[in-house]
Each structure stands twice: as structure tokens, then as C-alpha cells.
Image: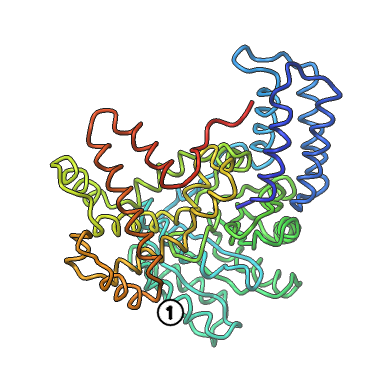
Amino acid sequence: MFENLSDRLTSTLRAVSGRSRLTEENVSDALRDVRTALLEADVALPVVKEFVDQVKTKAVGQVISNALNPGEQFVKLVHDELVHIMGDANDALNLATAPPAVILMAGLQGAGKTTTVAKLARFLKEREKKKVAVVSADVYRPAAIDQLETLAADVSAEFIPSSPDEKPLDIASRAIDEARKVFADVLIVDTAGRLAVDEEMMAEISALQERINPVETLFVVDAMTGQDAANTAQAFNEALTLTGVVLAKADGDARGGAALSVRSITGKPIKFLGMGEKSDALEPFFPDRLASRILGMGDVLTLIEEAERKVDKQKAQRLAKKIQRGKKFDLEDFRDQIEQMSNMGGITSMLDKLPGMGQLPPGAQAQLDDGMFKQMGVIIDSMTPHERRFPDVINGSRKQRIARGSGTQVPDVNRLLKQHKQMQKMMKKVSKKGGMQKMMRGMQAMQGARPPGPPRR
């Protein structure tokens, strides 16, 4: 996410971070590169101008903190200003009302609105412990109602039926009554999208908002449209009383223009990021965490929160006890670890949140590929239970059979077995005194690259 912007900014800031003092000249040189990086990321020009002016004003002649050298202080200023233009702090949903709290979803066709409704329903159900009902007031798009019904079943949300014969206003009013009857805490109303902003669409959704008086009106926009996302959000904001924005498809946005422009242009907070196709791929938007990711500082807090939610704690405890008892880490255990990593979004998602991982050499980054871990899982699945528990029995003929069964080559099977052996050694070291330091050295060997140190000063 935001790879292009992150690469440009981290290289620019690395050059200035070793400066013994900040002058107008070296600050101007650095900010010229920062300005170019932001414009290439499709950040709106007024936002870029304000950002650069603010950083320059604060940097030149500023009293430097005792804890930081001048270069580090400049990096902090850039970080803090990124946080500021994205909204300073997380802006959570306001559901403090008599149930059902109604959330109205708006957006253009194809932005991922209906999928976001399901993701939000799951988010509220699992993390906020709310009973959620959903209804579709999209009577124009073929199969829109059926799509929401299917998605609602997937996330275990209460689906309130509607029909293309009904009017959107009637659907929404009836849905509120139905939600009360089933004691739903929240009702999410999906609305019709259009291929472009038009008066008819705006008039309909404006009337809908006035009729049902939602506590939240969220605009869903495709993050990959860059500053156009911010401009479209502004057009909707002029017709509706928006309370926030959801950036869908943010995982595919290598530039970052939308995230850095929406708040400044619309004055409305970004509340969520859509980070993939799965129903759990919705993240609350934290400006400080995203700014850290953009500057290559990682996002450890989000990584810890994901681990708390998604890692199977019982399996983790069983593995820890098994290793402590001196038993070997077998291929069944290895398969479980691959599955746990997949549950957390895969290796690339995890690395994106670790500080300094952007400093890995390109060769090492290529080795740490989600496709490689998926292939490992398929190879292990092609083994017999006995082979998974006792990998040492896997001889030449067994390797050929496993390769045929998994659609791979014998060298792929050999590579997996070698990496398992290295992991096995790491696990053995972890169970002993000083195990964590030894495990890091083991990871270094497994990656075939030096582990990243702190960013160069």
C-alpha cells in the first residue's frame, strides 16, 4: 500500500536525517523532493502546497528537541504534518442513539459499496458486539439485492428483504421498523450508485437521508482513483451531510493520493480503509499509523491488534507446550503457521507493518512472497499424515509423488523440507535461554539476507 510514495519519501528523508543542522537551503531542497513525491502520488495540488508551507515554516529556525538531532526533527515534522492533513486522530462511528442506529452508505457504482456494507456489518458484529441488520435500497442495479443477501449470510448479519418494485424511501422506512422488531442495534442501508454524479441520483439519496435521519452517512470511494476520489467525495458532501469516508480498495493504491487529499478537500474524516476482498478486510483509519507506514516506520500497533483477533491462541499455546516438552516441530505445525500468517493478510501485509522492512534488499523481498507460502501449503497437503508428522521418511520416490500431487517440481519439495528444517532449529532455540536472539539469527539464515536494522541516520 502506497509503495511509490513511501519509497520516494523515505529516500528523501534519509538524505536529510543526517544533517547536523537545518537551514533554509537544505530544508528547501528536501521539501522540493517531498513536493514532487506528493504530486506523483496524485495528491491534490492545494493539499501539497499547504503541506509543504507548513513543514517549511515549522522547520526553519525551529528550536530542536533535546531528544532528536535536527535531521530526525525534520522527519518528525513531516510525519506530524502527514498525520494532520489526514485528520489527526481516529474518528470512530457515533452509534450513541436509540437502536437501531441507522448508517446510510453512498457512493458511485463500482466503488465497492455493497461489499463494504458486508465488511462493516462484520466489523460491528465482531469488534463492537452489535447485532447488525442490512437492507438494499438499490432498485436499479440487477441482482444488487441478491448480492447483499448473499454477503449478509456470509457475515451472519440480519438481512431485511426488499424488492425492485418498491421505492427506496419506502424500503428504508420499512427496514427501520423491521430492524426494531428483530432488536438490531445497527441498520446499514445500501443505496444505488451511478456511473457518475448526477442530479437525479443526488436528489434521491438526499430525500432518503432526510426521511430516515441516519446517525452516520458514509461515502464509499475507490482509493485508486486518487485525487478524483476527494473531488467526488466533495460533490457528494455538497448534496448530503456526510459524516465520514470509507476508502475502498486501499490495498491496491500504490500512490496514496486519496488518503492524503480527502480530509483536506471535504473536511470529513476517513473512518475506514478497505484492505482486500475478504469480509474481514476493513481497518479503522488511524492517521498516525498510516503516516508511520508511509514513512517506512511500520505499524506495530495494528499488527498486534490483528494478531490478537486472528491468531488461533489455542493452537499457539499447544505448539508452545509441545516445543517446551522437547518434541519436534513437524510439517503439521509448519502448515498451521502458514495458515495463521495467511489469516493475518499474508507475509507482505505483515512486512508492511514492521519497522524498517522497506530497507530489505530487493532479492530478500522477492523471496518473501505470499505465492511461495501458498505453494508450501499445497505441497504439505499432498503428503500423507505420517509424512507430515515424520518428514525424515520422505525419500526420493515420495518426493516425486508429492511433487506430482501438488503440481510442483522435486526441487520445490526439497526447498520446503530445507526451510522446515531451519524452522525446526529456530523453534528448538526459542525453547532455550536466550532463544529469541537465536531465532532472529535463524530467520536471517532462512531469508538469505541480513535482517533490517534501524533506518540509517
Is residue 80 in view? yes
Q: Give the residue displayed 24% in from the left and 65% down from the top.
A: 394
Return the residue found at the far right: 25
Q: Is residue 445 above or below residue 216?
A: above
In the image, residue 131 lies at what x, y percent?
35, 60
In the image, residue 224 lies at what x, y percent?
67, 61
In the image, residue 100 lies at what x, y percent?
42, 59
Q: Is residue 104 left or right of residue 149?
A: right
Return the residue found at the far front: 396
Amino acid carrying label 1: it is Pro
Q: Colour mode?
A: rainbow
Residue carrying label 1: 161
Q: Give the residue displayed 45% in from the left and 51% down from the top.
A: 97
Is residue 217 in view? no
In the image, residue 346 lies at what x, y percent?
44, 56
Q: Is residue 315 above or below residue 79?
A: below
Taking depth in this image into account, of 364 and 343 the one nearest to the observer is 364
Taking depth in this image into account, of 379 and 305 the one nearest to the observer is 379
Q: Give the residue displayed 64% in from the left and 25% down from the top.
A: 457
